[in-house]
Amino acid sequence: MKDLHTNTPLVTRTQGTGKDLVFIHGWGMNSGAFTSFIPYLSADFRITTIDLPGFGENAAHVPTPYTVANLSEMVAPLMPPQSIVVGWSLGGLVAQKLAAQRPNLLAGLVTIASTPRFVAGPCWPGIAADLLNMFKQQLEKNFSKTLERFLAIQAMGSDTAKQDIKAIREQITEFPSPSEEALKEGLHILSCEDLRSELKRIIVPTLRLYGRLDSLVPTSGIDRICELHPQADTVVLPHASHAPFISHPQQTADILYSFATNVYKQEAS
């Protein structure tokens, strides 16, 4: 069962039955990235996917300014009450913002290959600022080539890199192309957004899932994130890169299932 909801400014999609999981995608992507992964969980949970403003079916909705705060404010009304939000990469920034600003809205938070600050800085491992600047320059010339390069970096190190890239590319092209403004401003968010000081405000149960081979969210930064958010559970998939739900769907689904089932069990008791 899949429903398309258009009675709100932003489109969402829902399938499956049970307690609610809400998935938010990363930069340059859309909800299509989760197409092949959803069946691993939809027998046990009701899955809602939301295209971020400016992307996919919500490409026409681009807030000004394009900030994580504004994105989370636009997404918040679409969240089913007491759902677990699962944010991948850039979507993880939006999910963390939601959890920090609206704790009563959520039952739990999951970040996949995400961090409170993507760009590297003093004593903070992350993406080199030069790399993000290169993407910004390339984006102005050719979005398709820029996205291909970004996909290649996301899958780098995975044993199934070529298949992973092919799968994501095929799935996201089923959806409308993103807004150029959202692409540009999304890169600005990755370059500048810093939620580290807000992690102490996240009180909902949290799972942080990483790929050991991820070059965009390096494992060398995990200890720093744990220091800022010690109550979060941390799982590192040893053979995964930036998209573990594509390269290791069953393993990722099992981890999410265990976390979500435990969260909802504690909520009911």
Image (cartoon, helix red, strand yellow):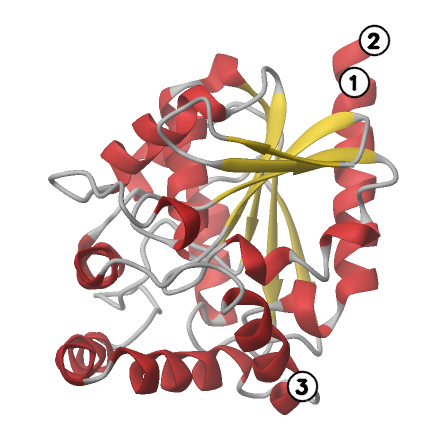
Which corner quadrant of the image does residue 19 belong to?
top right
Q: How far across and down, in percent of the image, does residue 127 sit? A: 32, 73
- Residue placed at 46% from the left, 36% from the top? 11
- Residue placed at 17% from the left, 75% from the top? 136
Q: Nearer the viewer, residue 56 or 243?
A: 56
Name the residue type under label 3.
Answer: Gln
Q: Which residue is mark 2?
A: 269
Q: Which residue is mark 3?
A: 163
Q: Nearer the viewer, residue 96 or 55?
A: 55
Name the residue type under label 1.
Answer: Gln
- Decide if residue 201 is in sight here: no
| In this view, 159 is above or below 262 | below
Q: Which residue is mark 1?
A: 266
Which corner quadrant of the image does residue 185 belong to?
bottom left
Q: Contact, CB < 8 Å: mark 3 with mark 2?
A: no
| In this view, 192 is above or below 212 | above
- Residue placed at 71% from the left, 79% from the top? 239
Query: Number of callouts in the render?
Result: 3
> How would you rate the neighbour count of disc 1 (Cα within 10 Å): few for under 14, some for 14-19, many for 20 or more?
few
Q: Secondary structure at mark 1?
A: helix
| In this view, 166 is above or below 197 | below
| In this view, 168 is above or below 251 | below
Q: How far across and down, in percent of the image, does residue 201 sit? A: 39, 25
Q: How far across and down, in percent of the image, does residue 18 sit? A: 81, 26
Circle 1 or circle 3, nearest the eye: 3
Residue 6 is left or right of residue 35, and the answer is left
Q: Secondary structure at mark 3?
A: helix
